[in-house]
Amino acid sequence: MLDLTKPCIEVDLDPDQILTTPLLNKGTGFTQEERDELHLHGLLPPHISSIEEQVLRRYRNFTSKRKDIDKYIFLKDLQDRNEVLFYRLVLEHCEEMLPYVYTPTVGEASLDYSNLYSQNRGIYLSYDLKDKMEDILQHVSMPSVDVIVVTDGSRILGLGDVGIGGMTIPIGKLALYTLFGGIHPQRTLPILLDVGTDNPKLLEDPLYLGSKHPRITGKTYNDFIDMFIEKVSKRFPKVLLQWEDFSKPHARPLLDRYRKKICSFNDDIQGTAAVALAAILSALNAENQKLKDQKIAILGGGSAGLGIADYLVQEMKAEGLSEKEAYSRFYIVDIYGLIHNKLSSIEEGQKPFAQDYLQIQSWVVKNPNYISLEDVVHHAQPRILLGVSAQPQTFTQPIIETMASYCRRPIILPLSNPTSRAEADPKDIIAWSEGRAIIATGSPAIFVPYKQEVIPIGQCNNVYVFPGVGLGIIAAKATYVPDEVFLKAASILSEYAPMINNPKASIFPSLKDLRNIARHIGIEVARLLIEKGFSTQTSTKGVENLVDSIIWYPKYSRITRR
């Protein structure tokens, strides 16, 4: 197995193998000496390009594409052809290109995956081939893997079941680990668990590339996941596993069941919660407010909504509230309306957040059997409103106008992805709040013109948190991932909010600063894990050097013949 992480790589490959290995291929960037030694003359144009020239050439190609999906395909093809150049290009144009590497365009790609498929990247573990799982993993051609992102394609963004198309998510997430956390791409592995699909369009599509049967469920599903954890732990005993885009019935149970068996976390639950907490802390810090003094309404009582609420509760407790007081600050609206203790249908994780019905029974509402978000805003008057419902246009004009009537600067976070599933359009929120709302969205929005101003809209993107958290976990050689690391990451991220120094600035820093922020998060996460005893490291001495030794920057290695 070739170790491609070294600054000088010795190979025993023929020219075609070199030019078709993404982490070896430099295209026109091979030096004269490399072309002589590796017998590449005649296979490449004679001009030797610097990587800066190559970036410029590829950027011109990228900007010539008009459709979002064409830009996604262009970048994907470059990644599959010349991986170092792909990362260098995207890193230098990260703010412009991130929407085409990940959300929202990755959602469009997941829906059309079987038609867009061109070259393998990652591992497909099919239930139909479960008896071959160990053999498949044993033949992964990597010397070692630091991080795996895995999905079963059951709840991709707000799009639902996309089956095997879910592979776009682990591939995209791991690209972000490399771009911002500096994890070498050879040490990352995307995995798709193909357990079937319940999407009738996919089952009827003759070109669908996944298993054409309904999703396995119950004990059959659980046994398959047990097998996966057993086999992946055997093959990569020190790996960090990130659960990604599993459906509501599985997301939290999988995290709870396996987080002590394998070093793992769920980014949809913990990463989303951390970045939302950071957004709220940033907005409150800019207004010299405390979280413990706020009321919070959340539309969506699934794993993401409850995960956010859990972290907010922990922060409120750290600010001095009792657990009971903290829980009472939340108004969570789900499929049956506001969650309260007289509802017959309450999930276990929702129970601590159930409002005391005695406290709300005096509310005058249209339907006593369904207390709506509009009812909550009118009567409870929360300052903070979050949406993780994947129900578009549910933050209505009356809701926003009501919040703006009792709050000078309401904090409104429509976080559902992709853009088509967002609870509101930022330009509407700005108009309805007379330009006063502090907004962060799940998908990129960037700026909204309003009167004589241009108002920046922050993206509440998990990329601000998970690459740094993962970097720290890997550096510490962690054995377990406690929630404290995400609270720490949120606190650090909130320190970088431009809004703190300029009320009209964004709630989140520029992506250009994210490598430095991820390094800061990584160092403090590694330190925390070591201090808490969740690490094979015994001392925090030299933790900065430990983190820095992992971080990779996309530049060409020297390639010689063995």
Image: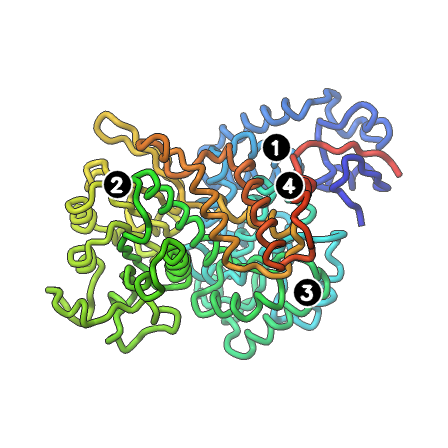
Q: Residue type at mark 1?
A: Arg
Label 4 vs 2, first from the N-terminus: 2
Nearer the observer: mark 4 or 2; the answer is 4
Label 3 vs 2, first from the N-terminus: 3
Label 4 vs 1, first from the N-terminus: 1
**Circle 1: element type:** helix
Q: CA distance from mark 4 to mark 1?
A: 24 Å
Label 3 vs 1, first from the N-terminus: 1
* Front-lying residue, 388 or 276: 276
Nearer the observer: mark 2 or 1; the answer is 2
Extreme residue toward the right, this view: 562
Q: CA distance from mark 4 to mark 2?
A: 39 Å
* Front-lying residue, 272 or 318: 318
Q: Is residue 433 found left or right of 116 in the rendered image?
A: left
Callout 4: 10 Å neighbours few (<14), some, many (20+)? Answer: some
- Residue 547 in which image quadrant: top right
Q: Which residue is mark 4?
A: 544
Q: Which residue is mark 2?
A: 437
Q: How does the figure colour the protein chain or chains? A: rainbow
Callout 2: 10 Å neighbours few (<14), some, many (20+)? Answer: many
Callout 1: 10 Å neighbours few (<14), some, many (20+)? Answer: many
Q: Which residue is mark 1?
A: 88
The quarter of the image holding the C terminus is: top right
**Circle 4: element type:** helix
